[in-house]
Amino acid sequence: MIPERAVTLTVGGGVTLEARLALPPVAPAGVVICHPHPLYGGDMDNPVVERAAQAAGALGLATLRFNFRGVGASTGSHDNGQGEADDVEAAMAELAGATGRVALAGYSFGAAVVAWVAAARHDVVGLALIAPPLAMHPLPTLDAFAGPLLVVAGDADEYCPREHLERLRAELPRARVERIAGANHFFFGKLFPLGEAIGDWARRLLPAAGPR
């Protein structure tokens, strides 16, 4: 795997974001990875975010994880998902300049943010929603999303209950919806199977991968 290096992303309004970029010499695509809720301790060093970056990076994909505005050394303040969508756009622009093809992955609050960004754009090549908090944040309509789409949550996730996940499965028949046995919202002790699920999704971003 390519080591990460620190980079700074510039967002409108004078906001800057601290980020870590892993960029192989030839990357077929890149994955922007977004962290859980900033007001509850979420940041880019969250173990789930790190596991997602490892799973994608192991396949030769570029990865970019960053702190949302107001977190760590990122400037600005929490904006209830609206300004955070701009943060994702800035991260996408950074990766697009290096790889040309960008996928999005987000965990919890980050999953909700990337879902809204992907629904508004036509150039997102893949989308991974990790433990989307369906009981708290409704997702946009994603039935027109054409790229590889993963929704993964634990079967003991209190913020992504089974009935909500099954409803989403019915709404998105093209999506790969996975439940990890014994995992709660934080995936304690279940980071390995989570990484396997993310790796299977990321593999479909490679040029040799055929359509689902």
Image (cartoon, helix red, strand yellow):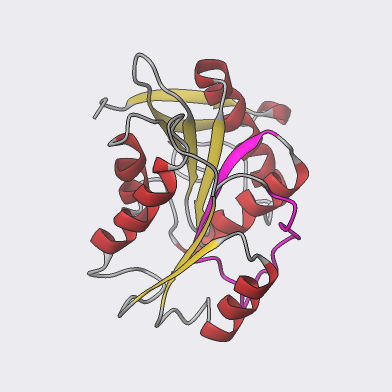
Q: Is residue 144 magenta?
A: yes
Q: Is residue 178 above or below residue 16?
A: below
State which region is magenta: 123-145
Q: Position of residue 21 (x, y in %)?
A: 40, 27
Q: Position of residue 199 (x, y in %)?
A: 35, 48
Q: Position of residue 159 (x, y in %)?
A: 52, 77
Q: Is residue 96 above or below residue 45?
A: above
Identify the residue shown where x is 40% and y is 80%: 155
Identify the residue shown where x is 56% and y is 70%: 133
Mostly what secondary structure, the magenta segment? loop
In the displayed structure image, the side of residue 103 where residue 55 appears, left or right:
left
**106 or 61, which is in the foreground?**
61
**72 or 22, which is in the foreground?**
22
Q: Position of residue 137 (x, y in %)?
A: 66, 69
**208 or 43, which is in the foreground?**
208
Answer yes or no: is residue 40 visible: yes
